[in-house]
Amino acid sequence: MPDETLPLRGLTVVEFSTSVAAPFAGQVLADLGARVMKVENPEQGDDARNWGPPFADNGMSPVFNSFNRNKQSLAVNLKDEAERGKLRDFIVRHADIVLQNLRPGLLASLGFDGKSLREAAPGLIWCDMHAFGAVGPKKAQPGYDPLMQACGGIMSITGLEGHEPVRVGPSIVDQGTGMWAVIGILSALRERELTGKGSEVSTSLYETAIGWVPVQIATYLLNGKVPAKFGTENFGYAPCKAYEAKDGWLMLAAGNDRLYKKLTDVIGDADFAADRDFATNPLRVENRDKLNTRLQELIVRGHRDDWVERLTAVGVPCAPILSLDEVVADPQYDAVGMEQQLPGDAMRLIGIPLTFDGVRPPLRHGPPDLGDATEMLDEEVEA
């Protein structure tokens, strides 16, 4: 996919960021063709550069490689007034979007804020990515993905009842916040197209965490009962659970009576199929412990892939629970072409989960060396 066909080509983004949330948002914009200029501390850069081992051939961590490809780096000492002035001038003259997730109040104290910059450049889109949000008693507190999974309720419903709290492995709050930032920015770009005016977009880790549990909160507000942990199950229908076969685990989700009937046909046990405690979904939910015990006894008699093949053949939703080495060996993994080679490096990364006319935006180049585009600021001042 040539650069000139990427949908966000021609847009310039200045990214004040560290860690994951804002870098991920910037990476999505960069993958879609925007010129993303990442502002970094000239002494050490983004902390994520050194999050390892392991490290790739370019000396950078998998985290930094994954969330900062296709960008350029501006090494700017934000404590230096002259350097701040050059950067501010660049933003006013060239930036379409400013994206930031630094410590609350830091950029504003240095003269970088949406209000003043938009007075100088009315078409500018400024995106704040907060920890706890722009208002409220915790607005000045920093935050991280695990903390937000904790205080946003996600960990309270993840894992098994009676066991210690469990964090969802991927940084779903960080990356989810990055996605909301991109959605907000794209919406603001559309508004600018209609009115010529920029705007200030705001999202936060806390709001994203709350946004991941809307059904559970709505259920609590409806019946006053605090949702329990359900492990791999769904609280609304059964069976929906991970079951262990002879040689591995599979996930099974029969969400209605029709699918349940197909499941019993494949299982092939007459007593199980005839059990009236499982005749309807409400009865299966009410008797889920009995259902799960019986299903486990039956499924463990067979092999994982055989169960998956037979159930899939009749339309019962199921999947093998794969380790990551099995994931990358799956033919479907190769078919969708998410894995891409980092140019000039042996490292392979996962591309953006979007295609345009069947083509996935490429990894045009790896993450930037620290300060690789800083001279551009001097060139712009002299121009």
Image: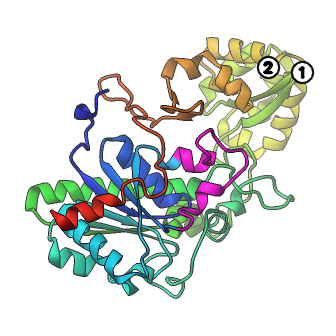
The residue carrying pointer 2 sits among few (fewer than 14), some (14 to 19) or many (20 or more) residues within 10 Å by Cα, namely many
Marks 2,1: beta carbons within 8 A:
yes
For residue 124, say whether it is visible.
Answer: no
Q: Is residue 271 left or right of residue 81?
A: right
Location of mark 2 (residue): 304
Q: CA distance from mark 2 to mark 1?
A: 7 Å
Which residue is rendered at x = 29% and y = 24% of the image? 357
Which residue is rendered at x = 48% and y = 56% of the image? 370
Image position, residue 36 (x, y; %): 35, 53
For residue 110, say whether it is visible.
Answer: yes
The kind of residue tagged 1 is: Lys
Quadrant of the image occupied by residue 290: top right
**SS category of the residue bearing label 2:** helix
Q: Is residue 54 magenta?
A: yes
Location of mark 1 (residue): 246
Image position, residue 184 (x, y; %): 32, 59
Image position, residue 112 (x, y; %): 33, 78
User: Main SS of the magenta segment?
Assistant: loop
The kind of residue tagged 2 is: Arg
**SS category of the residue bearing label 1:** loop
The region drawn magenta spans 43-66
Which residue is rendered at x = 37% and y = 29% of the image? 355
